[in-house]
Amino acid sequence: MITLGIPPCTERGLSRRRAVAGAAAVTASAFGVLSGCGIGAPGTAPGAPAGQLAGTLHLYGWDQEPISSTRRRAMDGFRERHPRLAVEKETTSAGGSAYFDKLQTLITSGSAPDMFIIQDSWQPFFLKNKLALNLDPLVKRDKYDLADFPKGAIEAYRYQGGLYGLPDNITSHGFFVNLDLFKQAGVQPPPTKEDTRGWTFDTLRQQLQQLTNRLRTDPPIFGITPNYSLQGWLAWVRSNGGELLAKDGSATALDSGPAQDALQLLADLRHKYQLAPTAQQLQGTNPNELFERGRVAIHEICVCQVARFRQNAQFEWDAGYRPAGKAGLVDHLFAFPQVLSAGTRNPDAAWAALKWFEDEGMKVLVEAGALQGTKMNAHQRAIFVDPQKKPANADVWVTSVEKFGRTPPATTNWSEVDAALARELTPLFNGERTARDAVQAVKLGVDQLVRDGRWS
């Protein structure tokens, strides 16, 4: 792991691509005080009109086309408003660890972006190393209203009284429902009303068994494609009353009965009930393609895929609520934050860019179908929920993430924890282990990592 750290006012020179000699040796302790470039530092260059921002601003993130181009276009209005400010928007097509490693390289070379996206589970790492700017003084100074952001997201960005980010997008793992298949089978589809009493794990399984029994085809129709990523299975575990980590963050907690039951159900949907495609059946294809071909009744995937299915799924489909386990309905809350660098040389401009992104830029992104939006009413209900576009009940996803969405826990070494969890749980989802054996392997192989990255 690279030790992140640059002095708070590191000189960038003429280009972010120029490495600063010796920067890799600087430690994160240098971030203690933002002397000379902190909040209230000048946001204008000499000779710039009063109140007009100037200088250079580097924005960094991940995405593929066409979203990356749309993100750049979303900031055009900001550039027009501040013509003396050079706004560089750079995106990489690779997310995950590749993006994390690239971001580390930029920071250690003294070329940290002024504003960048991170995964919510990476926040402890960035906060521990004092790499993120506290936005709270800026929010208070400008009386910036946070009320329309989901409370769960804002709470996830808070640490020791500070606020260290605002959402890049608010979304979840939604149920995409093939209404044609449910109609053909004469089975009731998932509910679209918030009152979901009776819509349980057992009810879901029973109805999908009815559907697949009545629609026997070759190639087969599948009842569901569960999302077997951590963000996917954790929502099922939490809904059933389980949790990933112990309350004190000292160990995993998947060995509890409710957690094991939920994990076993997800494996059984594949191997016992044959309602979900196995890894072997997915060779040469993927769950998105199966849904688009009309071979899946319920597809569990990030709602951010909605633009794809609006274009490719040529049948009647809709949104639907997830089922509730013993602890009630729980949804995953994707709340990846946009962060301002603690070492930004132009904090006023960076803050202005972040506000523009959250308010005006997001409208461009949502209208283009690129994102769901960060504000629940101004973006999601005003633009994303469009009666002229599928799904007819898109508000299901908005309400679900707003009321039932929860962010994942995190550690300072989350990439290692996540990889270890995948290593121990994949055999369960592939039918090679029981849930009991899998969670015991998790205890042996992951608990020490959790303790090493314990965060408070």
Image (spheres, grey):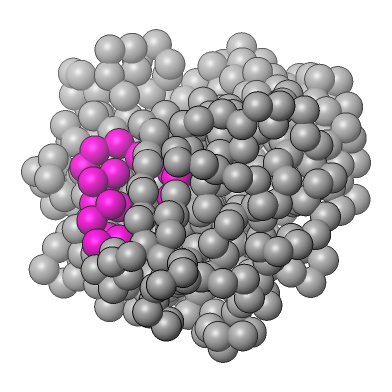
Quadrant location, the N terminus = top right
Q: Position of residue 135 (x, y in %)?
A: 64, 69
* Total residue callouts: 0
Give the residue displayed 54% in from the left and 17% down from the top.
Answer: 430
Residue 160 seen in the current view? yes
The answer to whether residue 200 is above or below residue 49 is above
Give the residue displayed 56% in from the left and 29% down from the top.
Answer: 19
Left or right relative to 246: residue 212: left
Q: Position of residue 293 (x, y in %)?
A: 16, 32
Residue furthest toward the front? Answer: 47
In this picture, which residue range is highlighted in magenta? 59-78
Residue 265 seen in the current view? no
- Does the segment drawn in magenta span residue 417? no
Q: Position of residue 325 (x, y in %)?
A: 61, 54
Left or right relative to 125: residue 386: left
Residue 39 quadrant: bottom right
Pick the front one: 2 or 111: 111
Give the residue displayed 51% in from the left and 70% down from the top.
Answer: 43
